[in-house]
Image: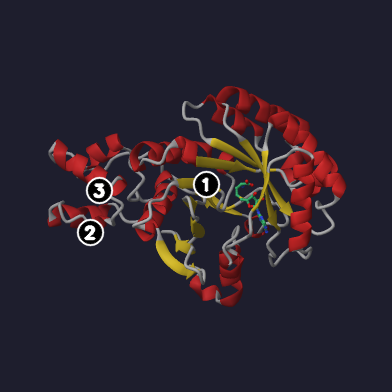
Amino acid sequence: MTNIQVVGRHSVDAPVLRYDPTRVELEAFLEGQPRYRIDQVWRGLYERGAPLEDLTDIPKALRSTLVELLPSALEPAAESVSRDGQTVKWLWRLHDGRTIETVLMHYRDRTTVCVSTQAGCAMACGFCATGQSGFDRQLSVGEIVEQVARARVTSAPRRVSNVVFMGMGEPMANYDRMWAAVERIHGDIGISARHITVSTVGVIPGIDRLGDEALPVNLAVSLHAANDTLRNELVPVNRRYPIEELVRACERYLAAKNRRISFEWALIEGVNDRDSDARELAVLCHRLRAHVNLIPLNPTPGYPTKGTSRAGVDGFCDQLEQLGINATVRRNRGTEIDAACGQLRASRQILDPRRLG
Ligand code: SAH
């Protein structure tokens, strides 16, 4: 084993974590080992879906060395499972004590993992628990990829079919590592790009870069308001990337990739759930043939306004459909276990601050 440069780390003095090295970097790391061993380790980490400690086909001594020199990035700080067992949420503690969340969701026809790309977030959306707590740091490639690897172990025998970059953080603000993680999840874990969704608050340069990539992933945009006055208030980054420019960037993405774009819309009572909101949203959707995902706002400690009632959500959805727009209501199935947008971390901070490193 030799010390090598691993580019996917979050900083030059961070440790090299289990899923940080690329295949080539791992080869350098395992210098002197026969090629078939390197293949075995790589397949063990990415294809087998078992913890490294359990890969008994790798000689014990090598396994112990790997476990020691390539430590796991994620130590469970809390885990919660919904009553029906269909949603699992983790709060992970990272090597420097920061915490992030990952959610595993089983549906009838698919199993989705929702991953974080940053510890905290700098986008400062007032209704979002992560936004309320500010930015800590970027996640490394390994810290992102291992979230999928760990969820996969828990998910078995059900296969993880989809990955959404909708956890903590703004994926486009950690673009290089986020994209390296997408390539690893696609190429090595084997989840097709068509089943990977990158969600952004609307960072236009990131959308344009995504359009230049070879892999056609799905793009989701957290819109929440369809006029600049309201969006400036709900999503502060709108002042930098206003709606008309954002929609044009989405048009470019659509032209480049021909993948369906979706808008996320957290329904907030009396704020963005009025008839006029539905009509304004419909105009933008028509331009992009976009799909809308509606979710009643989850309550967070720092935002007093309530989510729209169930009947109000259904009414808003019906109205969109009458305007010819495809919309889906996402029952925030995570609410009961704080599985939304930094809420597990936030509730831990309130309940038991000692648990945070
Ligand atoms: N930064 C990225 C991805 C993370 S947020 C983005 O903005 O898309 C994932 C989704 O959860 C976003 O659509 C976000 O706006 C939404 N969200 C944040 N806080 C929420 C809350 N309290 N209730 C409902 N949805 C929320």
Q: Residues within 10 Å of mark 2 (few under 14, many from 20)?
A: few
Question: What percent of the width, then of the height, locates residue 71?
Answer: 31, 56
Q: Amino acid at mark 1?
A: Val
Q: Secondary structure at mark 3?
A: helix
Q: CA distance from mark 2 to mark 3?
A: 9 Å
Q: Amino acid at mark 2?
A: Asp
Residue ID for mark 1: 164
Question: What percent of the width, then of the height, locates residue 266?
Answer: 71, 53
Query: Cβ–Cβ below 8 Å for labels 2 and 3?
Result: no
Sooner in the amino-acid sequence: mark 3 or mark 1 = 3
Q: Nearer the viewer, residue 300 or 64?
A: 300
Sooner in the amino-acid sequence: mark 2 or mark 3 = 3
Q: CA distance from mark 1 to mark 2?
A: 27 Å
Q: Secondary structure at mark 2?
A: helix
Residue ID for mark 2: 54
The residue depicted at 36 percent of the width and 36 percent of the height is: 187
Q: Residue furthest front?
A: 322
Q: Which label belongs to residue 44? A: 3
